[in-house]
Image: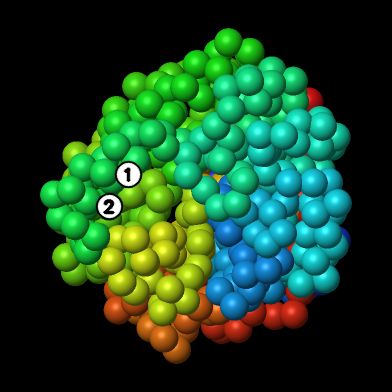
Amino acid sequence: MLLIHHATIINEGETFSGSVLVETGKIQSVFREKVPEQLLNQAKIIDAEGLWLLPGVIDDQVHFREPGLTHKGDIASESRAAIAGGVTSFMEMPNTKPQTTTIEALEQKFELAAQKSFANYSFYLGATNDNLGELKKVNSKNVCGIKVFMGSSTGNMLVDDQKSLSAIFAETGMLIASHCEKEEVIRENLTHYKQLLGDDIPVEYHPLIRSAEACYRSSAQAAELADKYGSRLHILHLSTEKEIGLFDSKPLADKKITGEVCVHHLWFSDKDYPHYGNRIKWNPAIKTIQDRDALLGGLLSGKLDVIATDHAPHLMSEKQGNIFQAASGGPLVQHSLQVMLEMAKHGKITVEKVVEKMCHAPAQLFGVQKRGFIREGYFADLVLVNPNKPYTVSPENILYKCSWSPFEGTTFSTSIEKTILNGKVSFENGIVNDIRGEALTFAGN
């Protein structure tokens, strides 16, 4: 038995002093009052006085690069970083090598994760213009969803055939997670800026090429398809104010169309490109301060539902050059919780809302079974945060295989003290212990 004693528990909109008893990987009891004396004598005790106890973060969008791109990151290295950041579960994307567009490739990823992952895991099956048969074979109780790239992507994973798109929305019966950027708008913008500036376009023009209009038109198309076919649609990494109008503020349980915001779109703006350069080059691009603030407002109003990372490591050498040469994406999963808690410290969002959007909402939205909440009978995926211990991101404490972070040199007000995975202490004193995660299970259709 493990007793987390005298913590400040933040869960389901409440903050209260209490203790949590863990046994056989599950939460056995949540105590608001005095803990029975016999338990104090029997259990191994973690003194959590002065610490916040949160559910483990569920990140619904990461790229851990395995198989085929493991020079950038792999399931072991990136899940270790996740655990150090309080992220106990992840859902990983299909644009690896080979791409995860067949059931066989999907099963191979699950086998890799069972051997290597330090966090709980699931994987998306990627859609193409011609793999509808594979998509229909997916077991919705074991797989988080289908990923559809409705914008430029690697290989053949851009789904740009209208008949194929309609069939995916109409016939698969799975949650569809979409990357939305309109390729034709991007091409038009690119032609314009090449004529204006030549081939050496600086990164400051990235959000003008991968523009707000490109994002909105693609997101609107996805929402229209979901409405037409009654599909369950989750639009990933929203980046513009205009897109927020596609969503309702009704309760999450009543929504068929939901939206995700990533920490980099909430933290940075286009004013940061001169300082950070290609380190903050993502697709979709980081846009204006007005867009950034509107995205936060969308979360607070309930129109937008989930905070995630789109963690996508590249070597720093791959981030060099002009807008055509520098890779898009960056590592985020180790510091996402600290980013949001820092925003809470500055009054932009409450800690309770951070927990809702990073822990509860992903569990509800995807139907993750018995995770994402501090409830009796649920898996003991938990995070202890020290709210009064500053933490500076440095090369010495970055765990990503790519060895850099856009937050390098940033001092956060909070530190991740311990992470508990399936009832076992998996991170403490700056060390990730040798504990493996489990495959997530879902409510299914």
Q: Nearer the viewer, residue 41 or 102?
A: 102
Q: Residues within 10 Å of mark 2 (few under 14, many from 20)?
A: many
Task: Judge from the rendering whether residue 22 lies leftward or rightward of residue 192; answer left or right.
Answer: right
Q: Nearer the viewer, residue 239 or 99?
A: 99
Label 1 with label 2: CB-CB less than 8 Å: yes
Which quarter of the rendering shows the C terminus? top right
- The kind of residue tagged 1 is Arg
Q: Name the residue rendered at 72%, 34% in the picture.
A: 130
Q: Nearer the viewer, residue 64 or 119?
A: 64
Q: Name the residue rendered at 51%, 24% in the picture.
A: 222
The residue lying furthest to the top in this view is 228
Question: How far apart are the alpha carbons under marks 1 and 2?
Answer: 6 Å
Task: Judge from the rendering whether residue 375 lies leftward or rightward of residue 134; answer left or right.
Answer: left
Q: Position of residue 388 (x, y in %)?
A: 36, 71
Q: Secondary structure at mark 1?
A: loop
Which quarter of the rendering shows the N terminus? bottom right
Q: Name the residue rendered at 58%, 35% in the picture.
A: 159
Q: Vertically, is 179 above or below 229?
A: below
Q: Secondary structure at mark 2?
A: helix
The residue lying furthest to the left in this view is 196
- In the picture of the structure, the residue carrying the numbered disc 1 is 210
The circle drawn on residue 206 is 2
